[in-house]
Image (spheres, grey):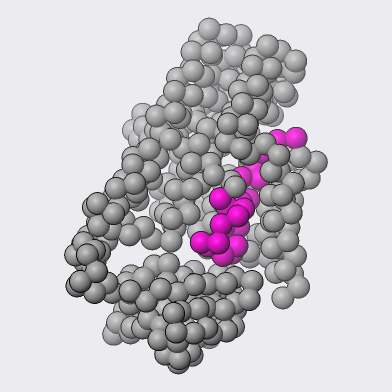
Amino acid sequence: MSGLTFDDGRLTVESAVGQIGLLAKEYALLHFLYLNANIVFSRDQLLERVWTGEYPVDRTVDDHVYRLRKKLKTIGGPTIETIRGVGYALSLRPSASDGREPSLRDPAVQEAMSGVFARYHRLGQGRAMLALAGQRETLGFELDSFYRLYLHFIAGDLRWFLETNEAPIGERIYWLLLFDMFVTDTPWSKAGLCERALRLKALPADGHREMELLNIADLYAAEGRTAEALETLEKGRQAAAEQKLDGFVIPIEISELYVRLMEDGPEASEMQSLRAAKLLEAEPYMRELAGYRMLEGTRLLLAGSISAGEALLGEGLDTFERSGFVPHRLLALLRICDVLRRHMPGSSAERKYSAKLATEYNRLGIAGLEHRLRETIEGYLDNLERT
């Protein structure tokens, strides 16, 4: 197998034979294809993943592939194959004698495993995804570039995202922004940071859409920008209906429950709670169900139903533990703390859940990384503005 070593800082690629220097987009394209070796991508898919937010001419991908082939040849690198009528794939074929499972060379197996990961993702079963990834050598499949990063996100591994050389900063920036959403006691505007990233088109296409139509609403609500939060979620609903973004539907309703709780308190948010609950009856996905239970438990606390509220909050935390989605558990705890600080400041409930959140930060090693996280994000955005 032709191994390559990538240097993000110098935009160089090295093999056992030699080293080549690349232009920025040549480097990004080769790195993406290398991380997704033996997977065929159409020109449109490559434009979306590598030239996010740009408007290149039709032959952009073809021209870059042509130049990369010439450069890779000089260092005995792998081949970028043309799949007629479909697109391109970087060929990293194990030899028959390398002892690796034949399933690694079987596209049907790779496609099937990607489908399993996607389904577990939708169902909110992070533990199942992590367990399956842990068996990939035995089962003989490779993770695609998205899930290589996403599994670290599920585990709440902020330090990995800050320090890894396995993925360039452009592929990590969306996840770093999500981590910034979860940290507390920071003097900067988190919404402002995300707005800047959106304005600079710094995020991959899927991340840009999710940030613009869903995630940033939480930040607006936390900063008292309720109208902008509700406007964001309404745009998200419209986009979900028009583009058939089924995975957005329930998270949007749960996010609005948080916004309503922040602004209006328990009584005014009851109808929104019922709306989210009805959707979850039909699709009780574990991650979303846990987030809803924690917000509804908080709503009951505010309404004076202490016993019922605490019971539902406990169920939510238990469901998150079973789901394995660490960042979503952090987000749910942060939402609870925001609501309780707004409506029950200094109460025993506010102190209790603030302490739980602090315990989680310490357990995950996130405490103390806030400023480093901020500097990493701003440094990347500063570089984009200069180029």
Number of dots carrying numbers: 0
Point out residue 361 in the picture as x, y percentages from the top left corner.
Answer: 62, 33
Location of residue 126 (image quadrant): top left
- Near-viewer residue (137 or 265): 137
Quadrant of the image occupied by residue 285: top left
| Residue drawn at point x = 68 percent, y = 11 percent | 348
Looking at the picture, how far across and down is residue 149, in whole percent? 48, 54
Is residue 161 within the magenta segment? yes
Q: Residue at x 21, y 61 (%)?
A: 101
Is residue 179 depicted above or below 38 in this figure?
Answer: above
Residue 380 location (% of width, % of height): 69, 63
**Is residue 187 rendered to the left or right of residue 376?**
right
> As rendered, which of 359 and 63 lies closer to the eye?
359
- Main secondary structure found in the magenta portion: helix
State the residue in front, 337 or 233: 337
Q: Position of residue 131 (x, y in %)?
A: 33, 42
At horizontal 74% and vertical 54% (from top left) the residue drawn is 375
Residue for point 75% across, 35% down? 185
Say if the magenta span includes residue 277.
no
Give the vertical position of 111 relative to 266 (above or below): below
Image quadrant holding the N terminus, namely bottom left
Residue 208 at least partly seen: no
Task: Tell me the quarter of the image containing the C terminus.
Answer: bottom right
Residue 22 visible? The answer is: yes
Residue range in magenta is 160-185
